[in-house]
Each structure stands twice: as C-alpha cells, then as structure tokens.
Image: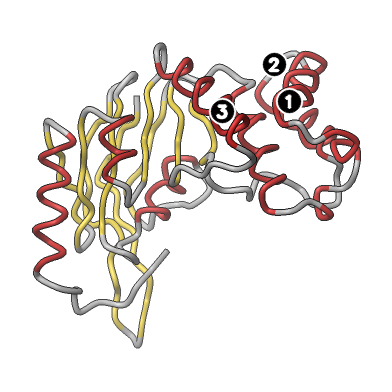
Amino acid sequence: MISFEHVTKAFWYRGQPKYVARDIHAVIPTGAKIGILGRNGAGKSTLMGMIAGNINPDFGMVKVSGEISWPIGLTGCIQGDMTGAQNVRFIARVYGVDTDELVEFVDDFAELGANYYEPVKTYSTGMRGRLNFGMSMGIRFNTYLLDEVHSTGDLSFKQKAEDLFNDRMHSAGVVLISHSERNLRSLCTTGAVLEHGRLTFYDTIDEAIEAHNRNMRFGSPNAASVA
C-alpha cells in the first residue's frame, strides 16, 4: 500500500513556488495497477521519487508497506565504477535476497556476456537498461514502479522481457508513468492525473486518459517545468 498523507512538494522559480504536489491525501492499495498521467514537467517523476523514498516532500509523508521496487525506468541505483555483477550483489544485500541466485538470474536474463564483469560506466544505455530491468525482475516485489516502458535489445530480447514482466504482473501491482496510451491501457486498470500539483484519481484508465487529453487541449499551464 502507498499512502500520501497531506504531501506537498514545490520547487522555487523566480521567487515563486511551483507545486509538484499540493496537499495530496490518498491511498493506492497493494495490487493496484495504476497509470499516472500529466503534462511534460508536471512533476510525475518527482512524485515517483517520493514514492520510492529518493525525494522528500516539503510537508506531509509518503508511507509504503510491502515490497516496492525502485523506479525501473531509471538507472540511478546503478553505480558506474562497479561491475554489473557487483551492482547486483549490492542490490541483493539491500533487499535481503539470495545473492548468488540473483547474480545468476541477471547474468542469464540481461545477456551482457563478459561485460557483466566490467565496470557499468563502460556500458551503453541499452546495456544499463537491461541490467536494471534484470535486477528488478529478479526480485519479487508487491508493487513495481515503472517510469516509462523502455525496451532494449533485439526483438527476441524485447519479447523475453515483455513475457517476464507480464508474468510478474499476475501477482503484483504497478505504478506506471507513461505518455503511451497503448502501454497505459495494456498494464493499468485505474489512473490518476497530476495537474497543478493536484492528483486526481479515476476508476478506469480510460477515464484518466480522457481527463489528461482534455487538460492538454487547454494548452500549457503558466508554470515552470519540473522533473
């Protein structure tokens, strides 16, 4: 479960606060498959960072229960001077899973070959993405945080990744940030729209998409963009 308790977050621009979250008070139950929509710069990734615990709100609190992943679409959890295998061992210790099993799983899944034992700073963006995705899929989470859906590798790898993620979704929830209506409809059943710091929830993902598209037709808000 993810609980927002009067969460407020703002960035300052030319002496004025630009709100990412404005007194958000809501609960996302365990197992929910929810898509979060919003304009570019509305603060969706910042909101995801607060759920993950990487960013602190200015006021209020975000409480989580159960096993929640780091934002899968981002590679900030990877340390570039360490090898891929060393990164996996570190993550295994943090989350309390069997180190050797996770190292073996990621080695097989990510298809990095000898690069698995080279520093991550030598990796291409695609290789980093496969490492990050493999680590997250190798650990069973109750809820996966997904910041956009990124597919890397050839067609066979993309299909393998999609099949594995769909398998995980049978027994887990997801919080997805995406601009793709196809991905939102494929992975989510409910939705929420972030607009001017307000997070409005909808019973279906189609209602959320419709509300977001309606907001977009009114043009950009008079506010500075934030991540």
Question: First in sequence: mark 3 or mark 1?
Answer: 1
Residue lying at 46% horizontally and 48% vertically, measured from the top left = 49
Expressed as whole percent of the image width and height from the top left, the position of residue 101 reads: 77, 13
Circle number at residue 161? 3
Residue at image mark 1:
106
Expressed as whole percent of the image width and height from the top left, the position of residue 35 reads: 29, 39
Q: Is residue 4 depicted above or below 137 in this figure? A: below
Q: Within 10 angstroms of label 1, few (less than 14), some, or many (20 or more) residues?
A: many
Amino acid type shown at disc 2: Val
Expressed as whole percent of the image width and height from the top left, the position of residue 19 reads: 28, 65
Q: Within 10 angstroms of label 3, few (less than 14), some, or many (20 or more) residues?
A: many
Q: Secondary structure at mark 2?
A: loop
Decide which of 165, 67 is in the foreground and name it: 165
Amino acid type shown at disc 3: Ala
Q: CA distance from mark 1 to mark 2?
A: 13 Å
Circle number at residue 97? 2
Residue lying at 22% horizontally and 27% vertically, measured from the top left = 189
Q: Quadrant of the C terminus?
A: bottom left
Q: Residue furthest front?
A: 155
Q: CA distance from mark 3 to mark 2?
A: 21 Å
Q: Which one is in front in this view, the residue at disc 3 or the one at disc 1? A: 3
Q: Which one is in front in this view, the residue at disc 1 or the one at disc 2? A: 1
Q: Is residue 209 depicted above or below 172 in this figure? A: below
